[in-house]
Image (cartoon, coloured by chain):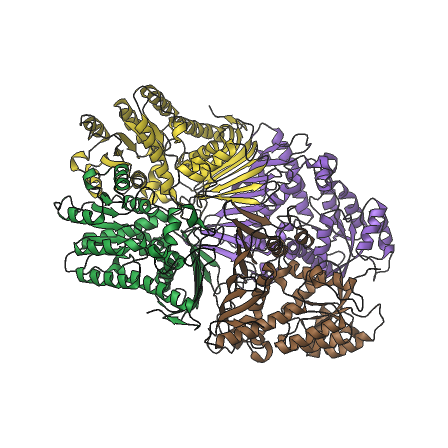
Chain colours: A yellow, B green, C brown, D purple
Amino acid sequence: MKRKLRMGMVGGSLDAFIGAVHRRAANLDGEIELVCGAFSSSPEKSKATGEALYLNPHRVYGSYEEMIKKEKNLPGDQRMDFVSIVTPNHVHFEPAKMALENGFHVIIDKPLSFNVKEAKALEKLVNKTGLVFALTHTYTGYPIVKEARNMVSTGEIGKVRKVYVEYPQGWLSTFLESSGNKQASWRTDPSKSGAGGAIGDIGTHAANLAEYITGSNIKEICAMLNVVVKGRKLDDDSSMLLKFDNGATGILMATQVAAGEENNLNIRVYGEKGGLVWRQEEPNTLEVKWLDKPKETIRAGWGYLSDTAKKNTRTPSGHPEGYLEAFANIYLNFAKAVHEYKPGRKINSEKFDFPDVADGVRGMAFVEAVVKSAKSNQKWTKIN
Amino acid sequence: MKRKLRMGMVGGSLDAFIGAVHRRAANLDGEIELVCGAFSSSPEKSKATGEALYLNPHRVYGSYEEMIKKEKNLPGDQRMDFVSIVTPNHVHFEPAKMALENGFHVIIDKPLSFNVKEAKALEKLVNKTGLVFALTHTYTGYPIVKEARNMVSTGEIGKVRKVYVEYPQGWLSTFLESSGNKQASWRTDPSKSGAGGAIGDIGTHAANLAEYITGSNIKEICAMLNVVVKGRKLDDDSSMLLKFDNGATGILMATQVAAGEENNLNIRVYGEKGGLVWRQEEPNTLEVKWLDKPKETIRAGWGYLSDTAKKNTRTPSGHPEGYLEAFANIYLNFAKAVHEYKPGRKINSEKFDFPDVADGVRGMAFVEAVVKSAKSNQKWTKIN
Amino acid sequence: MKRKLRMGMVGGSLDAFIGAVHRRAANLDGEIELVCGAFSSSPEKSKATGEALYLNPHRVYGSYEEMIKKEKNLPGDQRMDFVSIVTPNHVHFEPAKMALENGFHVIIDKPLSFNVKEAKALEKLVNKTGLVFALTHTYTGYPIVKEARNMVSTGEIGKVRKVYVEYPQGWLSTFLESSGNKQASWRTDPSKSGAGGAIGDIGTHAANLAEYITGSNIKEICAMLNVVVKGRKLDDDSSMLLKFDNGATGILMATQVAAGEENNLNIRVYGEKGGLVWRQEEPNTLEVKWLDKPKETIRAGWGYLSDTAKKNTRTPSGHPEGYLEAFANIYLNFAKAVHEYKPGRKINSEKFDFPDVADGVRGMAFVEAVVKSAKSNQKWTKIN
Amino acid sequence: MKRKLRMGMVGGSLDAFIGAVHRRAANLDGEIELVCGAFSSSPEKSKATGEALYLNPHRVYGSYEEMIKKEKNLPGDQRMDFVSIVTPNHVHFEPAKMALENGFHVIIDKPLSFNVKEAKALEKLVNKTGLVFALTHTYTGYPIVKEARNMVSTGEIGKVRKVYVEYPQGWLSTFLESSGNKQASWRTDPSKSGAGGAIGDIGTHAANLAEYITGSNIKEICAMLNVVVKGRKLDDDSSMLLKFDNGATGILMATQVAAGEENNLNIRVYGEKGGLVWRQEEPNTLEVKWLDKPKETIRAGWGYLSDTAKKNTRTPSGHPEGYLEAFANIYLNFAKAVHEYKPGRKINSEKFDFPDVADGVRGMAFVEAVVKSAKSNQKWTKIN
């Protein structure tokens, strides 16, 4: 019989940002319940978090190691089904590895890991265990992004020629990491974030979005990375020229020093017959520009949408869904895959339409290539 | 010790619209769990719904009467804390009355009841019992609507002079009720909806929004009601001139035959020094127009917002929240009030900032006055 | 042989607003040249204006009477062809009458006259003389407004059901007339403006726009007029419910106390199949909302537009035209009619597509009916 | 005594696009009159154009050489004051040179010439003669662009860090030059257009706009040029990374194959404290984003604007000006400079605020550098 799935969380104490997002995304549809967690390396923080979340104190653990071990020994009608990992990048690999090795499915925040090597090791393990593994590239969870992907793949705008993807934010315009801001601190610290700053934090989202919508991979880049704010150790600004597998070209920019910008991820894709424009800050709208007829505005919740968009929508048109709902779509699609999991059978993440470990490996390769390109005098650098 | 609140639901079977909205709103923040329900007058439907929601089959009831009686007899550590009523208008009064009489708090969809008489009876009962009672006028749950109310009350735009509130939808542009559409059928049926069609369904939202933001009541109206689609039995279109308590004047329109419109509730409030514009379809934005300086765009999630807006926000700026989050704010604020409830102490719904039974009574009086005005040759009709 | 038309101007000295607009509109297309003027009741001002405009000093006159008399006596290859009247409302009738009586075509700013009586007298005279007579209801000069009219008349959006037209401005939010502002002074003075304040100044534009696009006349109104700013003598704010000839209903508002608004004339027209939205401040765009397909955005300059829109456009799409170009379209269409003028033959202003004396009479009847309705306790007042 | 300036035109026959734009721009303010022209290399076309423009047939010439020679010999009270050159790029240099050598001021369409060599020769001649020379980089004629420049130069947004300038058009998405489209034909023909296609036609506008607003020059680029449409001989698409003199970096894209785009030039400039966003298709609006306060929307026609914006505005706020008015500002400012011209005194084009020969030289150097960079494997190429 079908039942709610049981989630254990690694990271996400009360003072973190993304942990609460994951929990709300998991809560929304009533398909998942949080049953345990190792919310912090500080036992006090972890305990306080568990209490605030009304968890059984016996299932609030002092470390992910403890959680995985103890949960594994619980009876099957209590034991967690999967682990949600919401720690900073340098604490992605170990808990993910241990969860997989102990038979737990995993959903994990992006970027996948600290570097390409870790990413590939995880991919190997996922392929070996056959467990369900999702990466929360939130923005492909929006129904209208799925509609855009569908329009490209069905040829409505013709062969894709140009792709412009942008991710401007402004919150790192000042030297915020010096003021004790937790979010800023680890993201600008190479020992926690990895080789990329802005490029890892948000550039990977942009690249993933472009590849998801176009169905084509970025194969070569020509990148400029900048440290705009004095004293910062990692890039806070990036721009690059792009070449795609399918012959299209384009531009990607991701910056955290565009003063006044919020979270303005946006993409424009032009084909032979028309162009698509999507902006994350108004996520329920897709503009479709045509060569010789009026621009159309596709909107979430209408009957004319594709099935894939409809399946990822909860409300009628004009009742806006947002970021948490996009996030919840990833959890919901992940949960559907977990329900269908059977040992020895490989899950088709394409069918369930969530970002998976292969997307994570691509993201890490992208970061590596951008850092390499930025240091090179050669124009073009391949993504391996 | 604080714990999750336990909710029982009346109405909201799988084929209903608003029931699922209420459930997601209740789920989102992890503060409420659905423990029981009487989801439909059809026992099969109710059972199927309970199953889909992973409920204990013993707590899926055949009627609200049964639910209230049996839950009352459960031990205190299992018994539901409150009832959520999501049935059509003509099945609001009885379950609400019975819940209150049996000591359960109530959260109920709008409009409050079938007519003013029922509304006033409920108000009396709420005042007598002191139980917590919330009405889901969703749109005042948006943080930016709260910001607008705050700007008016603190005098930022000066004394209010003009109020324009609109609620255009297009979904009833055709004779949809003849095609078996469940939503259309009861809303256009006077035996289920009450004296008002569009004016009750969405006009009450518009009036409530205008009064919430301005902090002033509509005291007189001059209304035109139309049945635009042939064969329909209730108004599907309304327009009216308004006079407010505080001397402001304005216009309200609510229509369901504006072909192509989605759910375009919007309001403009002009004071001596500036004007506010808010549109529900882009709910995270408030435009503020000034007499002699540039227009400003207030956005959800920024540090410059008032405390009341901040407390009703979950994500940073640029991570859009939507309709479900606004709905969830009503549930969350209601839940906070329930936690503070003590027998014999009256809850201040103003403090907890959710629409209450008095708003419901005002809504029903509004509908009654509009229907009266529409039939009259006199220009102005008072709202009692 | 065709030649540039020669224009004489009444009013429009250097410190006036609308005179310079008329001159630029007349200049733009190189079809008209200003040859003479009686720019002010002050001979010094008139002279200075003529000098600044590089006019022959002999043709800068002290009064319109002098101008009309002297120009009439000039040889045919020098004499002005038409008079442009850009004075305040109370100085419309006499110069227009005299010009017509002396064989000059007339183009005149709106509203047509001081009251209905004058308007009807002018209409009689135009019909008698057969001379070309245009009224500068600027906003119907926009190509996209013409496209909207065309879409309605060809039935694209189905039978019209609802019309919402608004004209909010904010510039009279304070008691500006006390500070020597010339524009504010005469417009708020009943001895210069006539019976209507905002309703005459901008309400007539709104009504004209609604009737032009829908091809239907407003037949009954239910109006509220307000004097919002203390000390003011004429209405600065108006709202009204509308009934149209063709069975549609609607709302008109025109206000000059919407603090922060610029010149935000806009209209929404909903038919059985779809709705149109046009906003003057972004005049090259027409939104078309549909019942069951994506919203379209019609834009000036595209090949898919109707002939009438194309003929009134000068630049390719994306090269925005504005207010002066709309104004120039009225001059250009008027000029075409003048070229076709032959004594004894009546000009079809419909064919040349400019607002004419009949529109002017309707405008004055509208103002009269609104003022009457505002004073009445009866709900509905007919426009005669 | 001041008088209207007399203009002679080279190019701009009836079937051309930009010639009519120049004439309307020159007409608008009544400061310039067209007195003669050599409109086409075809004498018939030239004659027909002159007739349609009501010119004296004796002053409609068969070639620019004839025009310059004959006009030079006319008496001073008839002779043209300046030449307006609106031919394709390969016919810019010779008429400009001859006009200057014969003492006529020049206003000329962009780009300045066929190549850098010609550009530098013209610059030398302008400096030698001291005659007034303007280049119609239309978009810097918009008052709101001037406001943006002013905001940067006065430090309101702090030191500039990032510049994103884009110029997407869609009209060359198909092989239009094969269908006899005159505009497409010469622009895609290297023998008429020069070394750059899109990069010369619109990329120069984008570069000029970025340099005008930031007050800083682009010093290095890393460019990708594409020929997207098969069979085309020149680039129809370009993207590049930018480094500015003042340390800012950025991106420029200019493409004519963004299907569905009209003329969507836009720029974003981010400084330490805030960011500016301007879009040509809504030219009267400047968005100003701030680090820690609400976004502001600057609008043309308000009292709070700088003098430079005000001087280039004709109408009050909300009465939109457009492309022709921006163009007219260049003519008007050029005309003011011509009025102040005295032989031997150098005109300060900065003071009169119009693009001059030095901007033209920079534009040609930009095209040359982009073409060079696109062919290079080195990342960065200097603009000389």
x, y (%) of residue A358?
40, 26
Residue nearest the observer in this picture, B375 or B354:
B375
Relative to C139, C372 lies left or right = left
Q: Is residue D358 visible?
A: yes
Residue nearest the observer in this picture, A271 or D337:
A271
- Asked which quadrant contains residue C88, the reply is bottom right
On screen, residue B288 above or below A15: below
Query: Residue at 86% of width from left, 57% of height from top?
Result: D74
Q: Is residue A240 visible?
A: no
Q: Quadrant of the C terminus of chain B?
A: bottom left
On screen, residue A47 above or below C142: above
On screen, residue B346 above or below A108: below
Residue nearest the observer in this picture, A48 or C322:
C322
- Asked which quadrant contains residue A337, the reply is top left
Query: Residue at 18% of width from left, 55% of height from top?
Result: B341
Relative to D362, C245 lies left or right = left
On screen, residue D114 above or below C55: above
The total of numbered circles placed on residues is 0
Relative to A80, B284 lies left or right = right
x, y (%) of residue D215?
57, 49
Relative to B38, C121 lies left or right = right
x, y (%) of residue A202?
42, 37
x, y (%) of residue B55?
23, 39
Kindly give the residue lying farthest to the bottom in the view shown. C191
